[in-house]
Image (cartoon, rainbow, N blue to C red):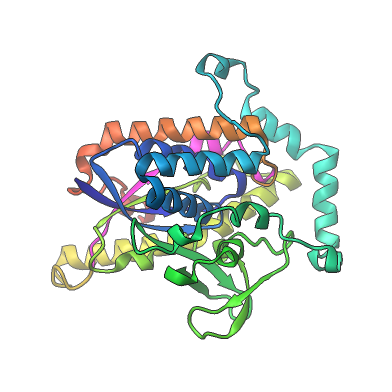
């Protein structure tokens, strides 16, 4: 049995890619998920996995993930027969069409001019209905993988991590709170115990990796990346520029944490730090940058059933490819070249 930790990025409806990755990993009977850290959509995926795992093992986790994303897309069943895949609209074409559509542009303009607080007593967090259906007795349970959720304190801009009994529906909603769309979520600060306002965890930790540095957790860290690190083309239109700003800002905290891991690896490798004095993580990554480069913030914001279904299948394929190429490396060696990434 090989034990791994999972780090699940946020990215709105693109989190359906992570759903597919998790669905495939859960089929590996000799792969144990020891801990999960998640932000925004990653927090939702992690919560669904843990709730289902505690209740019904691996198949229970897959079922709860299916239910979660069917609710996000507003459909009872998102399963698409394989023979239909070639006939589905290209997700890149859908993204471009949506990004440059008049309704989406109008919605973006209204979002810049109108605060979510303008709704007054009529406001309700749109995620509340979905999140409250999750089994929080399982999410908070000591059974199953350890689970950490990241949110950003509005007051000081620092990351906060919720775990154990602090994993309430509000903690999940705080982790996914985009301030241009949702009112800040007020919840007890896990560090101070005072009531604080929180925004999306992606601003300070997407996701935060430091909870996985605990000595009792395994050294293998598998990151499910849904925000492309590299885009070769320079953005020139206003939507492209806004989209790339979004990706860079939501990747910055992860890159910072990976640079710190690389620095520790260098210290240990050069003998400056004695082996065992600091945790030496082995970093792995599951992603599909080719697909994500075709998509945009538009498909993050609008949960289109056809795109969600295709993202799920893309996630399953990416996880399958990772297992085929790197399954034997888990527990042995790192498969992400951090030195090249930061060289």
24 in relation to 218, above or below: above
Q: Is residue 264 magenta?
A: no
For residue 231, say whether it is visible: no
Give the residue displayed 41% in from the left and 34% down from the top. Answer: 318
- Left or right placement of residue 257 versus residue 227 in this view: left
- Left or right placement of residue 287 versus residue 100 in this view: left
Q: Quadrant of residue 127?
A: bottom right
300 in relation to 263, above or below: above
- Residue 59 point in image, percent of width and height: 39, 39
Foreground of the two, 271 or 322: 322
Give the residue displayed 48% in from the left and 32% down from the top. Answer: 314
Q: Quadrant of residue 60?
A: top left
Range of residues picked out in magenta: 279-298
Q: Is residue 291 magenta?
A: yes
For residue 214, say whether it is visible: yes
Which of the image's four quarters has the C terminus? bottom left
Foreground of the two, 126 or 56: 56
- Left or right placement of residue 212 versus residue 95 in this view: left
- Residue 337 point in image, percent of width and height: 31, 48
Tally the numbered discs.
Answer: 0
Which of the image's four quarters has the N terminus? top left
- Residue 313 point in image, percent of width and height: 49, 30
- Left or right placement of residue 47 versus residue 98 in this view: left
306 in relation to 226, above or below: above
């Amino acid at each position: 049995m090989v034990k791994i930790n999972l780090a699940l990025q946020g990215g709105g409806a693109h989190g359906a890619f992570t759903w597919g990755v998790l669905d495939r990993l859960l089929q590996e009977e000799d792969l144990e998920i020891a801990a999960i850290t998640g932000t925004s959509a990653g927090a939702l995926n992690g919560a669904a996995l843990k709730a289902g795992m505690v209740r019904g093992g691996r198949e229970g986790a897959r079922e709860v993930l299916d239910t979660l994303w069917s609710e996000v897309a507003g459909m009872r069943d998102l399963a698409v027969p394989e023979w239909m895949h070639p006939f589905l609209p290209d997700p890149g074409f859908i993204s471009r069409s949506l990004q440059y559509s008049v309704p989406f542009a109008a919605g973006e303009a209204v979002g810049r001019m109108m605060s979510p607080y303008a709704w007054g007593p009529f406001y309700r967090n749109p995620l509340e209905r979905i999140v409250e259906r999750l089994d929080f007795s399982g999410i908070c349970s000591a059974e199953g993988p350890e689970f950490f959720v990241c949110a950003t304190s509005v007051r000081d801009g620092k990351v906060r991590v919720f775990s154990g009994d602090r994993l309430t529906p509000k903690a999940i909603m705080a982790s996914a709170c985009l301030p241009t769309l949702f009112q800040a979520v007020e919840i007890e600060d896990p560090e101070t115990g005072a009531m604080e306002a929180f925004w999306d965890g992606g601003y300070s930790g997407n996701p935060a990796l430091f909870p996985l540095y605990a000595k009792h957790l395994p050294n293998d860290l598998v990151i499910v990346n849904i925000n492309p690190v590299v885009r070769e083309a320079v953005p020139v239109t206003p939507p492209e520029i806004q989209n790339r700003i979004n990706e860079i800002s939501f990747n910055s905290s992860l890159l910072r944490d990976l640079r710190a891991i690389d620095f520790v690896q260098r210290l240990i490798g050069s003998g400056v730090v004695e082996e065992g004095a600091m945790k030496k993580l082995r970093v792995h990554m599951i992603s599909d940058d080719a697909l994500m480069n075709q998509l945009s913030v538009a498909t993050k914001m609008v949960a289109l059933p056809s795109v969600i279904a295709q993202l799920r299948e893309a996630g399953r394929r990416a996880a399958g490819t990772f297992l085929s190429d790197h399954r034997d490396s888990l527990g042995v060696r790192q498969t992400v070249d951090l030195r090249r990434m930061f060289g």
